[in-house]
Image (spheres, rainbow, N blue to C red):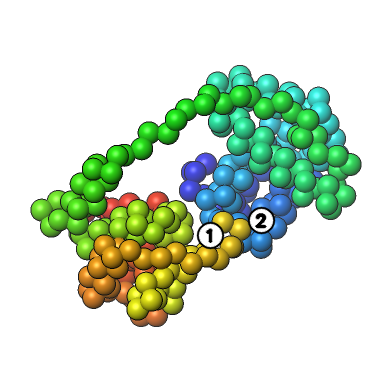
Amino acid sequence: MSISASPSERFQRFGDGPLKEAITGFLEDRARLSASTHTLRNYAIDLEQFLDFFTPATAVSQLGVNEMREWMAGLYDRKLTAVSIRRKVSSVRSFFHYCRQRNLCEKNSAKYLRLPKTPKKVPAVLDAEAVNFLVDNIGKAELKRPFPKRDRAIFEVLYGCGLRVSELVGLSLKDLDLEERWLRVMGKGSKERMAPIGHSALDALKTYLAERKAEAGEQAVFLNYKGTRISSRARKPAA
């Protein structure tokens, strides 16, 4: 199954049963609560594998602590990293919490699993000189990129305004106040905040917006080659 498949496509290969019904209900509930596309995708991947381990005919109430430990042992057998195991357990815990709220089970059995420790690493970050070099050069025409002014604006806004990639691709024209130099950002959990626009980001945005070519009615700030909203996982179109 393709990683990019939608939840409905992802679960078509399974027969009907209470566990499949509970999982698809959980995913629909997360979508109604405005979970991000990335979060929904991860839930679908993790719970597809969970369903594959137990089969659709299993009832959620049948999955106790011992069954959860067997499932987790299978994750170790697959040589998954501690980070991957922790994410999958987190997905299953969220699923069981949903099931408890709907009286599909008496307790959250996944809550009793012992999570593996993750190695503590100091993240590698670029120093100021490297960041400035990157931002200054990303928009140069000699790099032969199709949208150098857009790319320069993207980097300036990400770095200068402190946005996440998901927040940047979600920006619409109505979120920009270039006169007052503010961005309205919709963050995690649909929490709204205002971010100031620095001088470099403002100049890059104005330069890009002056040549922005959108499909009729498209309100996204940053566009792909089709003139529609860019995706956080957009790829260059095939030649």
**Residue 16 vertical position relative to residue 222 in the rendered view, above or below:** above
Q: Nearer the viewer, residue 162 or 15?
A: 162
* Mark 2 surroundings within 10 Å by alpha-carbon count, few (fewer than 14), some (14 through 19), many (20 or more): some
Type of amino acid under label 2? Arg
Real-space Cα separation, disc 1 to disc 2, in angstroms? 16 Å
Q: Give me the residue at 58% from left, 42% from top.
A: 45
As drawn, the residue found furthest toward the left would be 142
**SS state under label 1:** loop
Query: Residue 115 appears at what percent x and percent y?
Result: 67, 27
Type of amino acid under label 1? Gly
Verify CB contact (< 8 Å) between mark 1 and mark 2.
no
Q: Which residue is mark 1?
A: 187
* Quarter where residue 73 is shown: top right
* Quarter where residue 195 is shown: bottom left
Whichever of callouts 1 and 2 sits on the residue coming sooner in the sequence is: 2
Q: Which residue is mark 2?
A: 30
Query: Residue 131 appears at what percent x and percent y?
Result: 27, 46
**Residue 209 vertical position relative to residue 169 in the rendered view, above or below:** below
Answer left or right for 220 relative to 207. Answer: right
**Residue 116 vertical position relative to residue 230 in the rendered view, above or below:** above
